[in-house]
Image (cartoon, rainbow, N blue to C red):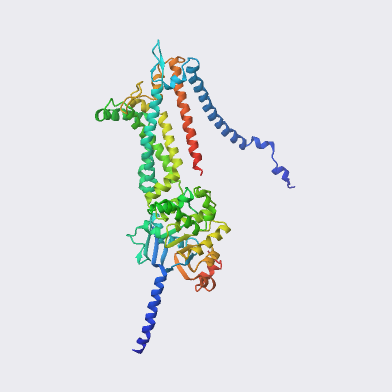
Amino acid sequence: MATAMKQRPAETDLIQSKENQQQNMVLHVKNLEIFYGEKRAVNGISMDIEKNSVTALIGPSGCGKSTFLRSINRMNDLIPGARAEGEIIYDDLNILSEQINVVALRKEIGMVFQKPNPFPKSIYDNITHALKFAGIRKKSKLDEIVEESLQKAALWEEVKDRLHKSALSLSGGQQQRLCIARTIAMKPTVMLLDEPSSALDPISNAKVEDLIVELKKDYSIIIVTHNMQQASRISDKTAFFLSGDLIEYDITDTIFTNPSVKKTEEYISGRFG
Amino acid sequence: MEKVSSAKDRLLKSGQDWLGGEFRGKALVILCAVIMISATIAITIFLGTKGLQSFIKDGISLIEFITSKTWNPTDKANPKYGTLPFIFGSFAVTFLSALVAAPLGIGGAIFMTEISSSWGRKILQPVIELLVGIPSVVYGFIGLSVLVPFIRENIGGLGFSLLSGTIVLSIMILPTVTSIATDAMGSLPGALREGSFALGATRWQTIKKVLIPAAMPSLLTAIVLGMARAFGEALAVQMVIGNVKNLPSSLLDASATLTTIITLNMGHTTYGSVENNTLWSMGLILLVMSFAFILLIRYLSARRKL
């Protein structure tokens, strides 16, 4: 009896802290498995992604981190034979469900790819492309969003005089920031970045990294990276993937200074991968 | 004692290299190129000199030749050499068939590359290859025995008409347009599609606003190549168009094109006669037009490099 009484406050504490945690989380991944045809690429992972923070996914090539990332905004739907089991809960809704309108989902969970992929159109049209589909037609409103998102992507000063020039005339780093800008323009909740600076030179890379840190004020960011220094510089939490398993997921400092799994330490110190 | 060769012996160019395979191979491919170039130049020069005879030797006015509506070369007292109806016929069937084939071909290409790449390709690809392989005389024959009576009975006129020629040509150039358009759409980087989808664009929005604009120069090239083929086609058109000398006033009127007049009259005119020379002049017009089509394609391809 006495022990039960003692336990109760502890239990409520636990529940409360869990609720707090729930509120600070933007995504809950539960037993997520992803298959390409017969092959299983992700083996039942569970993790919670924090709001307004940068979560880095690291691991050797083919470990399933990009596959996982692409499942969050259902980009894997485009790959024939790919399917996902388990749950990704976003705003109390399982986004892996058949009933999800993926087009609407991708407006809330935007994605930037490894290789900058601006459309062969003007800088301005690159940003307004998806806005027009979202029903924004007014020129003044479009102008406003274009400037705002280019400002946020730290590109405005460089391109404000040539908004109607082809986006392909920009440098690789500028193109990537334009791709980030056009994702920002959609005002997403979550931004998925798939090795966004691996194709860039060190200076552009630094700019993109600064930008990511800046962006976490407004967005929850999940970034796949092969660059350990990048993960340690910009992320708040880091998840280490290996052969489709989530090996370790913790605060970035802990992962890089005091990992609890030996494999993580070996990978981070460059002993394999 | 072992022979020690110096770097001088091994690495310096010697005169003997010229006689080796390198030289023979190079000579062979140069020869091929020279034959192709000289054949083209020879045809151009020949057609140029023959085609200009009617204007220089026979004194026909070029303006009259191109703009006059009356074609009556056999009238001994007052022969007329106006080819406007044929030039008009050629352009009319070319543009009309492009108008039909372009949307069909590009639509088919989008279906194959964007909508149903697996089974779409499995069925549509062989169909297109088959269409290319059918000889033009067969198209003409089918047009003559099916299309012409159908139009006569259900729509009106003689059946031999601009409309029949347009329909036959549309089907003939459809595979050209479709296959080039398919290559154009298929060679667009997948990143473009992903980029658009990731922003929450639907498939149709992506096709309409990203993919078609990105492929536009190549799609235009596809259409122009189809038009070049339509412009030069003689046999199938000749079998269904009716071959009359008058300017057609409607789609259902019989008509003629430059190519059909040449093939019809080449056999029964005397070489060197005025009428024969005017046929060469029409051939020259065809050549000039095909150069124009090539220039247009070059211009469009140059625009592709953004």
The answer to whether residue B115 of the structure is visible from this angle is yes
- Asked if residue A161 is positioned above or below residue B38 in the image, the reply reads below
Residue A131 in the image: state x and y as whole percent. Answer: 41, 54
Residue B287 in the image: state x and y as whole percent. Answer: 47, 27
The answer to whether residue B131 of the structure is visible from this angle is no
In the rendered image, the residue lying farthest to the top is B77
In the rendered image, the residue lying farthest to the front is A140
- Asked if residue B252 is positioned above or below residue A264 in the image, the reply reads above
In the rendered image, the residue lying farthest to the bottom is A2
Q: Residue at x 39, y 47 (%)?
A: B208
Q: Quadrant of residue B213?
A: top left
- Asked if residue A65 is positioned above or below residue B16 in the image, the reply reads below
Number of numbered labels in the structure image: 0
Q: Residue at x 50, y 40 (%)?
A: B303
In the rendered image, the residue lying farthest to the right is B1
Residue A218 in the image: state x and y as whole percent. Answer: 45, 64
Q: Which of the pair B13/B237 is nearer the observer? A: B237
**B208 lies left or right of B45:** left
Residue B209 in the image: state x and y as whole percent. Answer: 41, 47
Q: Quadrant of residue A23?
A: bottom left
